[in-house]
Image (spheres, rainbow, N blue to C red):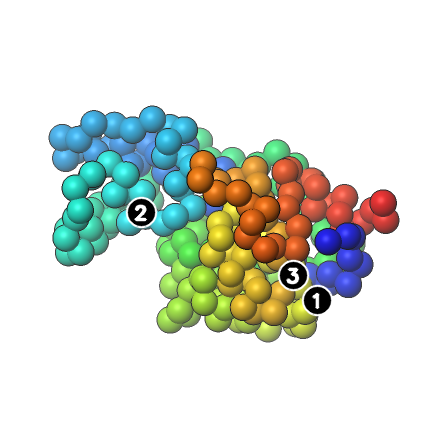
Amino acid sequence: MSNNSRVKAVLFDLDGTLADTSPDMTDALNKLLTKHGKQTLDYEFVRKNTSRGSIAMIQLGFEQLLEEKHSYQLRDEFLQIYAENLCNRTQLFPGVSELLESLDDSDIPWGIVTNKPGNLAEPLVQKLGIAFNAVCMVSGDTLARRKPDPDQLHHAANMLGIKVQDTLYMGDDPRDVEAGKAAGMKTAVAAYGYIQDKHDPHTWDADVVFQEALNLKNWLFNDS
């Protein structure tokens, strides 16, 4: 898909798209594994699975099929550890600050739509220094349904005051593309994010795939 000046608003996923949260999430997971007498996991292995959600991350280290009740108990422990170490090593991906500044300078409203719970997402965005200019922040527990359901994106578009067809949603997981397309938005993949080895983002049917965050800036504002 070529440069499209009709994009009037941009919505972003958080983990793996705006922020490199994997170092702190991996540390939290390894603390949980150590607590339960399990072997810790390699960072690169965990990183590729960060966007799959907390239950999927926990299952990386507890190889046996966990009962649902036990999975949720471990998830609560994991999220508590993570909440206490939310932004030790997390930082914005290269180019994200410049990208967001370019949107602000061009009066293109932007916001965040994430499946991360609000009690984690909101303080993290504050710590990263990007909360002030985000027009909307829709977390995993803002509504009853979350991605890949389009409800969060429809809600965010309403908050931005921009038609869905004039809005771009960018994420690093197939569910992000699925949700964006279901919402009637243009979709972009952050290929620099947490992509599993077996996945090829070019097969996700997104409108555009970006290898770096700043590629979005170039795509939006350059005619070439």
**Residue shown at the point (24%, 49%) measured from the top left:** 75
Mark closer to the chain start, 3 or 2? 2
Tell me how far mark 1 sits from mark 2, CA to CA: 33 Å
Q: Where is residue 79 drawn, in percent x and y?
A: 29, 47
Find residue 115 and report its image quarter.
bottom left
Number of labels in the image equals: 3
User: Label 3: which residue?
Assistant: 186
Q: Which mark is residue 56?
A: 2
- In this view of the protein, which residue sits in the foreground, 133 or 43? 43
Type of the residue with mark 3:
Lys
Type of the residue with mark 1:
Asp
User: Label 1: which residue?
Assistant: 166
| Image-based side of 4 in relation to 214, left or right | right
Q: Where is residue 110 drawn, in percent x and y?
A: 64, 57
Mark closer to the chain start, 1 or 2? 2
Q: Where is residue 193 drawn, in percent x and y?
A: 52, 40
Tell me how far mark 3 sits from mark 1, CA to CA: 8 Å
Residue 124 visible in the picture: yes
Mark closer to the chain start, 3 or 1? 1
Give the answer, above or below, for where 94 lies relative to 15.
above
